[in-house]
Image (spheres, rainbow, N blue to C red):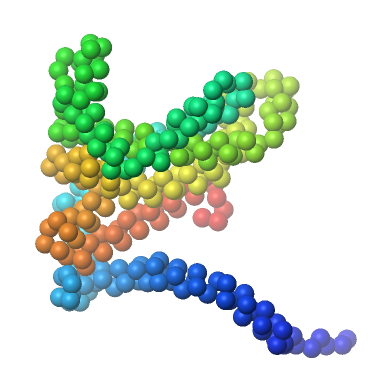
C-alpha cells in the first residue's frame, strides 16, 4: 500500500489563508476588545474593592458579601418574580397573536402586525415616561377604571409595592410581546400548509393541530425566544429606573438597577458592582440550562 505524502502548505495556500484572515482579523480583534476583554476585566474587578485607581485585592470577600446583602437579595427576588410571571405571559401572548395573524382569511393582518410590533421600536425612556403618567394617581388608567365603575378610588400603581410590580410587568409585556411574535410568525409561515391539510382530513380539530403540530414544530423558536427573554428580563433596568425608580422602597428594584446604584448613586464600589453583575451571568446560565432540559434538548 502506497503511503500518501503529508500535505504541505504551499505558497498559494498560505496566500489564501492570509487573505482569509485579513477579512476576519479586524472583526476578531474588535470582538476580543469589546466583548471578551471587558468580561475578563470585570471578573478580575470582582475580586477587588474601591473605585478609580484606589482598587485593592480582597479575594472572595465580595462574593461572600452577596449572601448577606439584604438589598441584593431583595433585587434578586424582584427580578426572579418578573421573570417567572412576565416571560411566560409574554410568550403565550406572542404565540397567540402569531397564530391569529397567520390566518390568511383575516382582514387587516398587516395593520395588526405593525400595531403589535410597533411598541418594541419605541424609545425605552419615552414609553416608560408615558406609562408613568398613565398609571399615575390622576392618570388615564385610573380615570378609565373609575368611569367604568370597576374601582371607587384611584389605585396607587406607582407607590404601592404590589401594584408597582404589576405596572412594571404590564409595561415590559406591552413592549416585548410583538418582538417575540415576529419570530413565531416567521416560523409559522415556513411550515408546509399540507401538514395542516392532512391533519384536517384525518379529523384533527384546530385545538389538536395547535398542540400536536404547531407547538412541536415551533419548539426551537420557542426555546430561543424564552432564553432571549430570560436574558432581557434578568437585565431589566430602563423600565424600573424610569417608571418607579426602584420604589416604593426597594419593592421594584432589579439587579441591574442595583449595579447602577452601587456604581454611581451610592459611594462607588466598582468591584462589588462587578460581583453583582456576575450574579446575573450565573442566573442566566442556570435558567437557560433548565429551559434546555425542559425542552428536551440533548445538547444541554
Q: Using the image as rendered, state which of residue 114 and residue 37 is in the foreground.
A: 114
Q: How many marks?
A: 0
Coordinates of residue 269 in the picture (x, y in percent): 17, 65
Q: Which residue appears at 73% of the width and 27% of the height?
A: 198
Place residue 271 in its image quadrant: bottom left
Q: Which residue appears at 88% of the width and 86% of the height?
A: 1
Q: Which residue appears at 37% of the width and 40% of the height?
A: 122
| Depicted 199 relative to depicted 9: above or below | above
Q: Using the image as rendered, state which of residue 73 and residue 262 is in the foreground.
A: 262
Asked if residue 119 lies left or right of residue 138, the reply is right
Residue most extreme to the right = 1
Coordinates of residue 293 in the picture (x, y in percent): 49, 49
Place residue 32 in its image quadrant: bottom left
Asked if residue 122 lies left or right of residue 146, the reply is right
Q: Which residue appears at 46% of the width and 73% of the height?
A: 29
* Residue 235 shows in the view: yes
Asked if residue 95 lies left or right of residue 151, the reply is right
Q: Using the image as rendered, state which of residue 272 and residue 182 is in the foreground.
A: 182
Place residue 193 in its image quadrant: top right
Asked if residue 161 lies left or right of residue 110, the reply is left
* Residue 84 shows in the view: no
Coordinates of residue 112 in the picture (x, y in percent): 49, 27
Coordinates of residue 275 in the picture (x, y in percent): 25, 63
| Depicted 120 relative to depicted 28: above or below | above
Amino acid at each position: 500500500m502506497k503511503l500518501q505524502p503529508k500535505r504541505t502548505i504551499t505558497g498559494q495556500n498560505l496566500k489564501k489563508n492570509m487573505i482569509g484572515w485579513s477579512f476576519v482579523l479586524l472583526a476578531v480583534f474588535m470582538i476580543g476588545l469589546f466583548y471578551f476583554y471587558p468580561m475578563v476585566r470585570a471578573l478580575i474587578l470582582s475580586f477587588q474593592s474601591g473605585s478609580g485607581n484606589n482598587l485593592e485585592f480582597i479575594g472572595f470577600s465580595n462574593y461572600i458579601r452577596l449572601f448577606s446583602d439584604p438589598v441584593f437579595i431583595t433585587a434578586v427576588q424582584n427580578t426572579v418574580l418578573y421573570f417567572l410571571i412576565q416571560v411566560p405571559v409574554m410568550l403565550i401572548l406572542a404565540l397567540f397573536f402569531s397564530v391569529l395573524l397567520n390566518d390568511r382569511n383575516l382582514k387587516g393582518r398587516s395593520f395588526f402586525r405593525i400595531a403589535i410590533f410597533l411598541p418594541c421600536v419605541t424609545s425605552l425612556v419615552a414609553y416608560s415616561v408615558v406609562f408613568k403618567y398613565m398609571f399615575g394617581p390622576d392618570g388615564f388608567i385610573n380615570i378609565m377604571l373609575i368611569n367604568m365603575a370597576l374601582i371607587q378610588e384611584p389605585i396607587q400603581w406607582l407607590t404601592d409595592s404590589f401594584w408597582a410590580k404589576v405596572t412594571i410587568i404590564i409595561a415590559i409585556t406591552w413592549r416585548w410581546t410583538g418582538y417575540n411574535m415576529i419570530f413565531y410568525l416567521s416560523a409559522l409561515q415556513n411550515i408546509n400548509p399540507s401538514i395542516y391539510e392532512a391533519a384536517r382530513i384525518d379529523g384533527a380539530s384546530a385545538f389538536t393541530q395547535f398542540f400536536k403540530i404547531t407547538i412541536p414544530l415551533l419548539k426551537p423558536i420557542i426555546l430561543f425566544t424564552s432564553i432571549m427573554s430570560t436574558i432581557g428580563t434578568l437585565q431589566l433596568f430602563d423600565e424600573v429606573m424610569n417608571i418607579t425608580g426602584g420604589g416604593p422602597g426597594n419593592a421594584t428594584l432589579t439587579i441591574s438597577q442595583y449595579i447602577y446604584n452601587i456604581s454611581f448613586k451610592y459611594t462607588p464600589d466598582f468591584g462589588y458592582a462587578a460581583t453583582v453583575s456576575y450574579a446575573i451571568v450565573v442566573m442566566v446560565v442556570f435558567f437557560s440550562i433548565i429551559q434546555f432540559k425542559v425542552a428536551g434538548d440533548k445538547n444541554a
